[in-house]
Image (tube, rainbow, N blue to C red):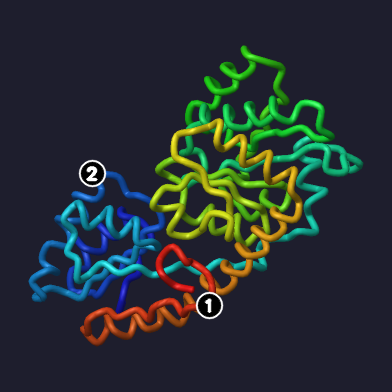
Amino acid sequence: FDLIHCWSVGTFSLASLLLRGTPRALTLTCDPGRRASDWLRTLTAESSRGTSTPTTLLPISSTLRRTVLSAGVPEPITHVLRPGIDMGRVEHGRRAAIRASWGIEPDDDGATKVIAIVSDPPHGADGIAGVRSVGIATEQCRGKPYILRPLLHPQQLNRRVGELSVAALHEHPPTIRSHRTEWPWQVLPGCDAALAFGPRAGGLSLLWAMAANVPIVGEATYAISEIIEDRHSALLTQPDAPPSNAYKLVQLFDDQQLAWKLRDTARHEAYSFFSRRRYCESIKTVYEQLLAGQPIDIPPLESTGGLRFTGRG
């Protein structure tokens, strides 16, 4: 091999130990955790001295970059490379079929609002906070011509506890459970909103929600605020506040013009900043620089009106 591009810490470990003389890159799409970050520091220690085989880490966000740098991974080899989203995978024409698989009748006509809980991995978000947010929103929606149902992974963290805690308080529409949340583009066309919260949000699933033209409510954490902005491409809330999430969800469903504006802006920014073409051009540059033993220099995002939180636009 002339170069190895790894997509997990495990494959990067294998390449580092068995093919030490081959240039290599590692793409990080979610927080590797403390132990894996410490192991990455060990694997990349020689790179900081400039005497080893060219190596680079490519986290998809500044938040992930800060995470691995705080573990001691050398800064010169760690570079943010925004991912590419294949927007052609989002099939809006399958909305009725997707909802029918969840038991929602074709003549529902918007009476059931499905809210996707997005995180990376898809079951990593706290089910208690997600179900409670939707449960509180349901209480606020009493008397309105729609009901709310959260979409969760069957192995969602604390899912069962969340369902029981809400059911004990009031009658609540059942949650929808689907393993297909592991492939967000397969379920998001059937959803009416996306809810992003907690330390595992702000990754690829959030980008898929933007690409799927789904209005987003998210907590104002570093990872989420790096991608979306309040009342520009989403509605943001204070962290760890399910009542605030609930209020914003109801606001979305009650103000269709606002929802349209937010989702249209988010989709435009997904197309502008996370296109496959942009990613392919950037990764080609990285490959060429690695093979030539040159410092990695990834072209920055152009100022096209989005990602204003980072000073662009």
Q: Residues within 10 Å of mark 2 (few under 14, many from 20)?
A: few
Task: Determine the secondary structure under disc 2.
Answer: helix
Residue furthest out toward the right: 107
Which of the two discs, 1 and 2, sits closer to the camera? 1
**Residue receiving disc 2:** 35
Q: Is residue 85 left or right of residue 260?
A: left
Residue 155 in view: no
Residue 149 in view: yes
Q: Residues within 10 Å of mark 1 (few under 14, many from 20)?
A: few
Residue type highlighted by circle 1: Thr
Considering only vertical position in the picture, is 2 above or below 225? below
Considering only vertical position in the picture, is 168 above or below 95? above
Q: Which mark is residue 72?
A: none
Considering only vertical position in the picture, is 218 above or below 299? above
Viewer-nearest residue: 73 or 236: 236
Query: Residue 62 sits in which quadrant?
Result: bottom left
The quadrant of the rendering that contains the N terminus is bottom left
Whole-angstrom CA distance, mark 1 to mark 2, is: 38 Å
Residue type highlighted by circle 2: Arg
Query: Residue 63 sits in which quadrant?
Result: bottom left
Q: Position of residue 20 (x, y in %)?
A: 18, 68
Task: Determine the secondary structure under disc 1.
Answer: loop
Q: Is residue 89 left or right of residue 16?
A: right
Which residue lies at the image location 74% right of the left edge and 48% below the top edge?
255
**Residue receiving disc 1:** 304
Q: Position of residue 198 (x, y in %)?
A: 44, 40
Q: Position of residue 239 (x, y in %)?
A: 44, 39
Q: Is residue 57 left or right of residue 202?
A: left
The answer to whether the residues at label 1 and label 2 have Cβ atoms under 8 Å apart is no
